[in-house]
Every structure is written in C-alpha cells, then in structure tokens.
Image (spheres, helix red, strand yellow):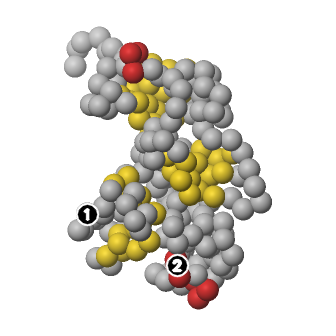
Amino acid sequence: MTSTPVNLLSLRSNQNSDRPKPTTLQLGQLAVNYGSADGGVYYEDTGGSIRKIGPNHYGTSAPNSSAVGQTGNSLGETWVDSSAATYYMKVWNGSSWQIVGSAFADTATTAGSAATATFANSAAVASGAVFAESTLIASGCIIASGCIIASGLPISISLPASSPEGTLMYQAAAPSGLYIYIGGAWVQV
C-alpha cells in the first residue's frame, strides 16, 4: 500500500480500578486499563453494560472495590478471594459474588475423596481451585492448555444440551454452580 498508515488508539488508563463508563464508549469499542492491580480490557455490550475481558482478579478484596471510574462489576467477572485461610473462586452474578460450584469441597486432597473431581485422576482439589489430572483449572484460573479464563464466564439459567468439549459455564438455576462439558455431558466442578 502506498497510503500513510494510521494508528488507532483505544481508550486507555493506567489508574487501578479505572473502568470506563457506558457514556464514554460506543458499542463494541475497546478500552484498556493497564494498571497493575486491576487491569483489563472493557467493551460496551448491546444492553449498555460494560463487560470486562481480562485476568481473573486475585486478592483480599473484590475487584473494583475502590472504583476510580465506573462502579460495580461485570456479569460473569471472576475473583479468587484470598481474604481467609481457604481461598474461594467467586463469580459476579449481577448482584453479588457467588462461590463457584455448589458441590464445592474444601477438604478433599485427591479425586478418590472428592465427588466433584470424578472425571479426573489424582486431582488435588485445593480450596476449590485445582481440578483434574493435569491441572485443568488452577488457582488463579489458568488452564493447563495455556488459555486464561477471564471475566466473562458465561452464566446461564440452564445449561445448553451440548457444547464444545471443555466449555465452562456457570448455571444460575438449581443445582447452581460451575460446570464443564466433558465427554458429551455437563459435569459440575
């Protein structure tokens, strides 16, 4: 091409917890926060809500608890709560933080003693964060394949009949919890 290149810059901030407000973004426009404590990529969805795409928050207080920009959290945003001796992975359901998985096991050390890990071999279920023989889900939500589960974990009233292998989804209706689609079936983790 012989034309002059144009640099497109997203809205950006380096202040921790500086989330964009819906009035500052257009539908689908990206905003980046590269602050070290609560970074992420944000966009406005068709419902006018700001959604976060970014790392799982890890800490003693919930993400965006000291908001600089937009207050609140994104539906499906995740947080590893390290405020107590037992760490819990939590998901924002739109009104409160929910511990992931109703069949959660705090004290299990192997798959043989944890019903929640029946699909794994010698899984260490530690504070509800580590599952599967090759660490399918680890503390901080890093998947062994190299993918990172970020905010935006799908939340549904009920699970679809089928899904791609390895899909994670939070079911809001009873029995609520985090599910993974493995071997043609949904398994609660």
At label 1, the amino acid type is Pro
Could you say where residue 126 lies in the image, as x and y percent from the top left?
66, 69
* Residue 122 in the figure: left or right of residue 28: right
Residue 31, compared with residue 171, is above or below; it is: above
Residue 132, compared with residue 46, is above or below; it is: below
- Judging by the rendered image, the residue that carries numbered circle 1 is 160
* Residue 46 in the figure: left or right of residue 119: left
Q: Is residue 21 visible?
A: yes
Mark nearer the N terminus (2 vs 1): 2
- Judging by the rendered image, the residue that carries numbered circle 2 is 117
Looking at the image, do the residues carrying marks 2 and 1 touch, with CB atoms under 8 Å apart? no
Q: Secondary structure at mark 2?
A: helix
At label 2, the amino acid type is Ala
Could you say where residue 54 lies in the image, as x and y percent from the top left?
49, 41
Between 22 and 41, which is closer to the camera in this rendering?
22
How far apart are the alpha carbons under marks 2 and 1? 21 Å
